[in-house]
Amino acid sequence: MTPQEMKQLQITACKVRMGIVESTHGAKAGHPGGSLSAAEMFTYLYFKEMNIDPQNPQWADRDRFVLSKGHTAPGLYSTLAYRGFFPVEDLPTLRHLGSYLQGHPNMNTVPGVDMSTGSLGQGISCACGMALAAKKMGKDARVYTLLGDGEIQEGQVWEACMFAAHYKLDNLVVIVDNNGLQIDGAVADVMSPYPIPEKLEAFGFEVERIDGHDFQQIEDAFAQARKTKGKPFAIVMKTTKGKDISFMENQASWHGKAPNDEEYATAMAELKAKMTELEGM
């Protein structure tokens, strides 16, 4: 990755974070913490990794993405908007009556959403089905799914992992956002999923551990995923919940609440300062 590519991705991730703040503030509800922790991953997937066409969201041969941790829809919506699937100006309508941007992704109303999600644990199963279907149909499409580290406390996740390994779904990439926090506190205290990489390896995955805020590490992991044959691939990314907003970072309380007017102003000022810094690099 060239320095210019890195800079552009960082700028885009900052814009995605601004969209997350705009939408949750507009909704007076939503889930900013886990959306912000995955901003780099959302950005890389939609601006570098995936074979997609915003002008033709239903293109049959596109790659697919399933947001298994569906409550972080603000992160996905912001990314889709900046990628050109729908107007950025619509983000503040999140969760409003009559808005197509509801609290969890709906494939029937939101351009670019490949699967409706929200019930934790189920998205990865849908992704496995998509990956198997692509193989049966002889298509080159790849399938990506993002899970929360709290979400993997659900038993269905591990049934899906067993399925993925059994059917040798090497066109599937499972991403775990290991920000360490869920709605009730630290995942290690609520119901520890650790050690995550070793569990995935035991279920038959090739696994990469990365810093989920480092675009070079993200790129390297996806390059390795494409080289891996005969087994599914997993990326366990260490992240910071509420990343780049000082009062939200590493605070479980920001799992599922929106910024008020004062908090909104502070968050946007911090992100604009970050944007100015990136543009000046």
Image (cartoon, rainbow, N blue to C red):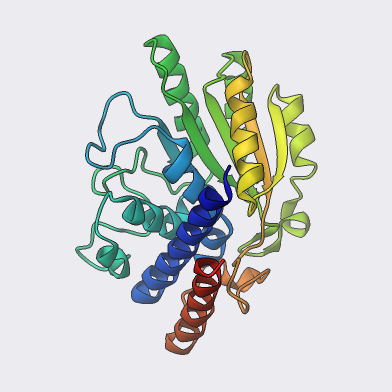
Q: Position of residue 83 (x, y in %)?
A: 34, 50
Q: Position of residue 24 (x, y in %)?
A: 41, 70
Residue in the image at 28% along x and 25% along y: 60
Relative placement, left or right, of 268 versus 189 is: left
Q: Quadrant of residue 114?
A: top left
Residue in the image at 42% along x and 18% along y: 140
Q: Quadrant of residue 213?
A: bottom right
Q: Position of residue 78 (x, y in %)?
A: 38, 58
Relative placement, left or right, of 201 versus 276 is: right
Q: Quadrant of residue 219?
A: top right
205 and 28: which is toward the camera: 205
Instruction: Check the image and report above or below for 206 versus 2.
Output: above
Rendered-image quadrant of the N terminus:
top right
Q: From this viewpoint, is residue 159 visible?
A: no
Relative placement, left or right, of 21 versus 146 is: left
Q: Position of residue 28 (x, y in %)?
A: 39, 76
Residue in the image at 32% along x and 55% along y: 81
272 and 4: which is toward the camera: 4
Instruction: Check the image and report above or below for 96 versus 202.
Output: below
